[in-house]
Amino acid sequence: MITSEEIRKEFLNFFEKRGHKIVESSSLIPEDDPSVLITTAGMQQFKKYFTREKDPIKDFGTQRTASIQKCFRTTDIEEVGDERHLTFFEMLGNFSFGPVGSDNPQDFSTSGYFKKSAIYWAYEFLKSLNLNIDYVSVFKGEDNIPFDEESFNIWKELNFSEEKIKKFGKEDNFWGPTGEEGPCGPTTEIYIDRIEVWNLVFNEYYKTKDGKLTKLKYPGVDTGMGFERLMKVLQKTETVFETDLFEPLRTRILEIVPNIEIRDLRIILDHIRGATFLIADGIYPSNLERGYVLRRILRRLMLKLNKYNLVKDIENFVKSVVEKFEQIYPNLRNYDKINKVIKKEFDGFHNILKKGLTMFEKYIKGNEEDREIGEKLFILFTSFGLPLDISKELLREKIGKEFTETMQETFDLLFENHRKISKSL
Ligand code: SER
């Protein structure tokens, strides 16, 4: 079975041969970009090359780069636990910064390229791995941005029938920008086993803070392929969590708790990796911005570990992540620091969690109306410090209820009143 280590090499070699400079992943803390909290995409470290504020030739000796980028998406935190959502993930990407010299897939030089080379190379790379594309999608045109006929025709040239080239609108086939402003454009997406595996973005526009689109001086290419998803289709696992990217951590957890609930296992796998990488890149738990993101996942992680009496094993679990990734990300070797940060946060949260768990069980019966549950969760939060994230998990775990909009509304209303009263005191 092909391993993720082999795929890393194959991907980078493939694009290096085609004139790309291999660039290391940037930190999860974006440098030089106040418009985003955490690195969410491979293109982020290259934003200024798309706009030409920076010169790719000067910095890379070529207009083509490729990378495997660490990413973290906070929008997905609450979804983690299902089959495919992750907070931390890696993205394989190739990039071209204009002007376009030639758009010929046989051209292995260092000049800028566009849709034809990007699509042909994605197709060839997947073929070299013996993967069959189910279907692709292109931008159908919307809001005065035209139909991407060029991509449509390129896929036809590659012998895709029209039924296999789906046309979608902005919601699906227009990407970006990251943060409040930046390059963006129509996309073509590649699906394997009904999973979107590779997103090819043709950056033709720049979106400004006030939402206006202007044409970029030179068009660029920004592709991103989810590494975990790619390994899932290559290793033919049921979900991303059984790929080797979650080993040896997964096996170690299963050795201790063979009957762990699948949703809990996924949350633990995701959050340990996420926390380890965030801390290695210099983030500390706090109540603000990225620190708060880390705090949220550490607290949820503790809740889940506590359920299976695994809190004491955290050091070993972190070590398992480090073992897998330290060759690629040497800053993980500092795992004493990582463990210290986690332990400190766990120690600080221990009493809140203990008391909160007892009060939750005493207080919430499960037969209340949603509004009443919202009120009770608010009281648990203000009187015992039990975070809403944790309460949501407990609702599901202890009484089999999902957190609803009504509960959220009630909670928010009480919170707002509480804030006003505290302010006026
Ligand atoms: N920026 C695009 C994405 O994040 C492609 O790399 O999906």
Image (tube, rainbow, N blue to C red):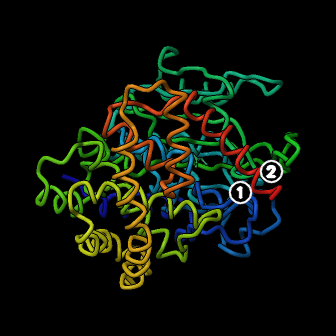
- Identify the mark at residue 97; answer none if there is no mark: 1
**Residue in the picture at 29% in, 40% down:** 239
Name the quadrant containing residue 196.
Answer: top left
What is the three-letter code of the residue carrying label 1?
Phe
Identify whether 4 is placed above or below 173.
Answer: below
Q: Please tell me whether mark 1 sits on a helix, a strand or a loop.
A: loop
Question: Could you tell me if residue 91 is visible in this image?
Answer: no
Q: Residue at x 37, y 55 (%)?
A: 270
Beta carbon at label 1 within 8 Å of ligand 1: no
Q: Secondary structure at mark 2?
A: strand
As rendered, which of 172 and 367 lies closer to the eye? 367
Within 10 angstroms of label 1, few (less than 14), some, or many (20 or more) residues? many
Q: Position of residue 358 (x, y in %)?
A: 34, 52
Residue 69 image offset from top left, x and y in percent: 51, 62
| 71 shown above or below 135 | below
Separation of marks 2 and 1 at Cα, in angstroms: 8 Å
Q: Nearer the viewer, residue 168 or 309?
A: 309
In the rendered structure, the answer to whether residue 129 lies left or right of residue 173 reads: left
- Where does label 2 land, which residue? 218
Q: Residues within 10 Å of mark 2 (few under 14, many from 20)?
A: some
The amino acid pointed to by label 2 is Tyr
